[in-house]
Image (cartoon, rainbow, N blue to C red):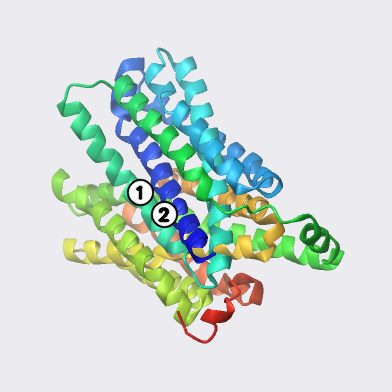
Amino acid sequence: MERSLFGARVATYVYFVLCGTLMGAWVVHIPAVEERVGVSHATLGGLLVLLGLGAFAGMQVAGPLTDRLGARVVVPATGVLCGAALVLPALARDPWTLAGALLVFGFCNGGLDVSMNAHAVHVEKAYGRPVMSGFHATFSVGGVLAALVAAGAAAAGAGPVVTLAGVGAVSIVIAVVSARVLMPTVPAAGEAVREQSSPAPSARRGTAGRVWLLAVLALMVMLCEGAANDWSALHLKDVLGASTTTAAFGYGTFAAAMTAGRLLADRLAARFGSLAILRYGAVVAGAGITLVAFGPWLWAAFTGWALFGLGLSGCVPQLFSAAGHADPAAAGANVSRVAGLGYVGMLAGPAVIGWLTHLVALNHTFVLLTLLCVATAVGAGVLRTDSAAPTPRPEEAGTGR
């Protein structure tokens, strides 16, 4: 049992790296695809919305399917589909074919995202202690890996079609090989009957309401994250007058702090609880972005972006975990709701900040992010419930690990 559980955990890490690599491989090839298709930045921005819409749709389909068929079926299937779809944007020759390619790739990527998170919930429950943040940290590792592969391929003279096809092919093999050690997350017949008959209607309504509250919190947190992704470098360059090279370190500081925070968050959650990670993480993030909004010096901005990333780092994993544990029999569907609404926030964040710049200076638009962090800290009490935490296994009870 210990070996199979460890194997399932390793496989989950593999799929998170895989998802991050596939998305990262597309991101680093955006300029090349834009040039090949011959579209403007504005047109490309509109087309990228289709990627988000496809991902949202894929999440809503894959979540219930994971509950019904099991992660051992859906996770590798979506991994294979996502690997196969990766090359499609590079093959596009006009805006219409690129639109279709992005819609398909987004759908497959969203399905992989939700199904692997649903499987991660079951792995965490079996371990009896927080492990979700570690999975999310490895997603970032996949992005770094994609950048290195793309740089190497470009140095070797390989074009986007060859590179994306190669990454996709390797990803398909990895998705298939890793499938055999995933957990069978569909309950046995007798257990399924008990799970379906036990919850009272009022309890199910209460769980559904709680999941939607978690989704609203995810929307606010991921809106903050999306804003940082697109506006951190521009803030340093346009507001504080930093060079392009120095400004790039704004996002780098945020991303590095977020990755480091996620590597630490599981141990902190095991010791202090997921409620503390969400509440105090939001407080730290709020303090950081306030420093960014009003700090007149570069060192203050770098410190603020680092605190913002560190504070946000553990928030999303706690929300996904709580959604999955709210009703293990519907973990996929619940995670899809939280991830889907959160993804809307991620897409909306850059646009909302951009719109606000018509009214106030860029740095002052970040006050909105401060308010969202405060609202998240206030709403963190939704995690104060036993179903938000995994049940310790007997041999781990009382160890504090």
User: Seen from this angle, which residue lies furthest top?
Assistant: 93
- Position in image of residue 354 (x %, y %): 40, 44
For the point 46% across and 27% down, which residue is it? 84
**Between marks 2 and 1, how big is the CA–CA gap?**
6 Å
Residue 343 in view in this figure: no
Q: Height in image: 195 above or below 79?
A: below
Q: Nearer the viewer, residue 319 or 305?
A: 319
Disc 1 marks which residue?
Answer: 229
Going by the numbered disc 2, the residue's amino acid type is Glu
Determine whether 347 is above or below 169 in the image.
below
**Which element carries disc 1, helix, strand or loop?**
helix
Residue 351 vs residue 358, the one in the foreground:
351
The N terminus, quarter of image: bottom right
Q: Do the residues bearing badges 2 and 1 touch, measured as CB atoms within 8 Å?
A: yes
Check disc 2: other Cα within 10 Å, few if <14, some if 14-19, many if 20+: many
| 7 sits left or right of 290 in the view | right
Query: Is 379 above or below relative to 254?
Result: below
Q: Residue at x 47, y 53 (%)?
A: 12
The residue type indicated by label 1 comes to: Asn
Tell me how many marks there are: 2
Residue 109's x, y, as percent? 50, 38
Q: Residue 193: give x, y in percent of width and height.
A: 83, 59
What residue sits 46% from the left and 44% below the top?
178
Q: Position of residue 139 (x, y in %)?
A: 39, 50
Residue 322 visible in the current orientation: yes
Q: Which residue is mark 2?
A: 225
Point out the residue furthest to the bottom here. 398
Q: Is residue 141 left or right of residue 207?
A: left
